[in-house]
Amino acid sequence: MSLENIPSLLADVWGITEASAQVLLSIVVFLAVLLPVMYLAKGKNTFSIVIVIFLVELFLVGITWLPFWVLIATVAVMAIAIAMLGTNIVIGGE
Amino acid sequence: MSEQRTFVFSVTFIILFSVLLSTIPTGLLGEGANPDMVTSVDPNVVAGFSDTENYQESNFTTGLYDYDLGGRSWRCLGTGTSFALVAKVLVAGFLWLGGLDPVKFVSSEGVDRGTELLLTEIATDADEGTISYELLYVDTGNAAGSFIVYWNLTEYTNPSNAWGNDSLYLMHGVGLESTAVIDIGSLLLDLLTLQIPQVPLLVNVLLAVPIWASIIYLIWFIIKEMIPFI
C-alpha cells in the first residue's frame, strides 16, 4: 500500500467518493502541520506560514491527493500578495 | 498615481507569478507527459516520468517483450496489429508461476480501449503522430503509468506502416519526475488559452482572469503613455 492509495481505501471503507476522501485527508494533513506552525508563529510570521502551506501543498499534489491546479491557484494568490506588498513599498501605501 | 500603482502591481504580479510557477517540479503536473510534451522519434525528451522503458518492433521476440519497470516485471505482447500489456504476478517477489495482472489503455480523450490496443485505434487517437494512454490495472483500477506511442508522421502516414518498418516507438513511463522544472512557456500558454490539462474550465478561467487583466492593463498603460510622444 502506498500513500497514493490511502484515499481510495478510505473511500471504500466510508462509502464516499475518492475525490472527497482526497480532500478530507488533505485537510487533516494541512491542520496537522499548520496548527503547530501557527501556534509557534503566534500570529506574526505570516511569511513562514505561507511557506509551510506551499510546501504541504507541493507534497499533497505530489502524492496526487490534491489536483495540480490548486498549486497554480496558490502561486497566483502568493504572487498577488507579494505584488501588493511590493507596490506599497515602491509607490507608498494609500 | 493610482495608474502608476496599478502598473507597478501588474508588472510585479506577472513576473512573480511566472517565477513562482517555474519553480514547481514538472512531475507534479500529473503522471506522465501529455502528447504535446513529446517530440517524435526522440524518447529522451519525454519529461514527467521517474522511470521509463522504450522499445520498438525489433525488441520483440516471438511477439513478446519483457522488461522490469517501477518495481514490477512487465510483458508487452505485440501481434503486429495490436498490443497488450501485462504485469507478471510474482510469488515471494521473484517466482513467476504464470500469473498476470493485465492493464487497460485509456486514451487522453478518456476513451477506454480495453486490454488490447489496436493499431487502428492508435491511428484514430493519435494527434500529430503521438498519443499517450493512461494505464489502469483491470483488477484494481489503480494507475500503472502511461503508455506513449509515437512515430514520424512525415515518413509514415499511419502506425501500421511505422510498425512494419521498426519505426513505431513505444514508451512505458511510471512515477513522477521531481527534478525537472515545468515548461513555463507552454504552461502559461495553456493557462491563458484555458487549456490546462485535467483542470476544470471554470477554475482555469478564474486562474487566467488576473493574468489577462494585468496583461491588458499593461498594454493599455504603455499605449496611453506613448501616444503623447508620437
Image (cartoon, coloured by chain):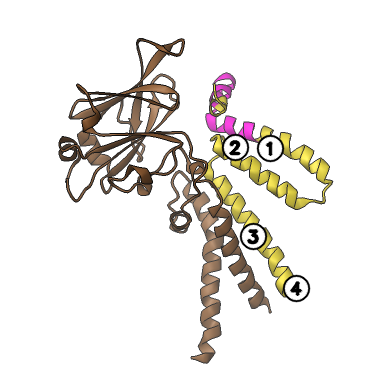
Instruction: Say the numbered circle drawn on residue A93.
Output: none
Q: In which quarter of the image is the N terminus of chain B?
A: bottom right
* Amino acid type, callout 4: Gly
Q: Are the residues at dot 3 and dot 1 in contact (C-beta closer than 8 Å)? A: no
Q: Which residue carries the number 1 mark?
A: A30
Label 4 or label 1, whichever comes before in sequence order:
1
Which type of secondary structure does the marked residue at label 3 adopt?
helix
Chain letter, yellow: A
> Mark 4 and mark 1, same subunit?
yes
- Residue ID at (56%, 34%): A65
Image quadrant assignment for residue A60: top right
- Residue ID at (42%, 44%): B47
Label 2 or label 4, whichever comes before in sequence order:
2
Observer-nearest of A84 and B160:
B160
Magenta range is: A8-26
CA distance for labels 2 and 1: 9 Å
Mark 2: give few (<14), some (14-19) or many (20+) Cα within 10 Å: many
Circle 3 marks a residue in which chain? A
Instruction: Say the numbered circle drawn on residue A80.
Output: 3
Q: Which residue carries the number 4 mark?
A: A92
Q: Chain B is drawn in which colour?
A: brown
Label 3 or label 1, whichever comes before in sequence order:
1
Q: Which residue carries the number 2 mark?
A: A60
Residue A21 among those drawn in magenta: yes
Which type of secondary structure does the marked residue at label 1 adopt?
helix
Mark 1: give few (<14), some (14-19) or many (20+) Cα within 10 Å: some
* Amino acid type, callout 1: Phe
Image location (x, y in percent) of residue B110: 36, 37
